[in-house]
Image (tube, grey):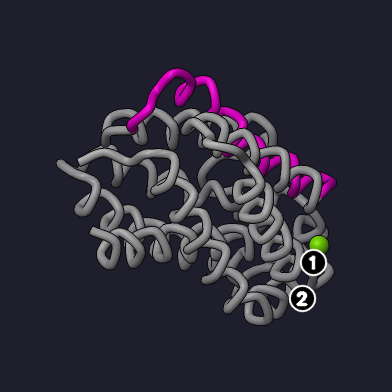
Amino acid sequence: MTLGPAELAAMIEAVARRISTERVALNRLDAALGDGDHGTNVSAAFNSAVEAIAALNQPSASDVWLAAAKAVMNSMGGASGAIFGSFFLKGVPVLRGKDSVNKRDLEAVLEAGLKGVKARGKAGVGDKTMVDALAPAVTAFAGADDFTEGFSSAAEAARKGADSTRDLIARHGRAKYLGGRAIGHIDPGAMTVAILFEAIDKWSREAW
Ligand SMILES: [Mg+2]
């Protein structure tokens, strides 16, 4: 089982649809810790990625990922745009020259993306950021035997990771100024990652 450019595009489209549905809920999470626009921004970013990919002419797998990276960075802007954008950008060289993406390839793409997010956000696990969902999701995916098992265990791990941010103090972004008052609130970036993997998991079960 492999993924081609069309499947990668469909995956991103499924994520965009689900994030758009969760836009208001994500804004509400962000309102507790930041300025309440995370859902709107991340939804616009993924919709813009879908549009940019649709405008490509017979794209390769790396073209799809590069278009997503650029669209996310341009649409979101600022620190969040750079962080979400680097997730896609770091996968581009991994995908270059590959017509079809097997499970090991996607593993490498996710690992490169995680590395990019950590470097760009200067955050590790426990800092109450999207890394708390992304890192366990990538590990879970890598530990699975195939795509189907990988996506479902990644979704489960991401959700658990996002939930874990509820009890954490933030060391980044606006939420760090809240100190202990950040406790009790899930990080919206981590929740976005959970939603992303849940959308991919659902897509893979319907598409295959
Ligand atoms: Mg904001």
Image position of 33 with respect to 81: above or below: below
Residue at the disc numbered 2: 31
Q: Is mark 2 within 8 Å of ligand 1?
A: no
Asked which quadrant contains residue 2, the reply is top left
- State the image coordinates of residue 41 (x, y, percent, origin top left): 76, 63
For the view shown, which residue lies furthest in the front direction? Answer: 57
Q: Residue at x 48, y 66 (%)?
A: 195
> Is ligand 1 within 8 Å of the beta carbon of the residue shown at mark 1?
yes
Q: For mark 1, does the 10 Å Cα neighbourhood hold few (<14), some (14 to 19), or many (20 or more) residues?
A: many
In terms of depth relative to the viewer, which is nearer, 13 or 184?
Answer: 13
Q: Is residue 81 magenta?
A: yes
Residue type, label 1:
Gly
Q: Amino acid at mark 2?
A: Ala
User: Magenta segment, which residues?
Assistant: 77-100
Q: Is residue 2 above or below residue 19?
A: above
Q: Which residue is mark 1?
A: 34
User: Left or right: 91 with respect to 170?
Assistant: left
Image spot of residue 138 (x, y percent): 38, 42
The N terminus - image quarter? top left
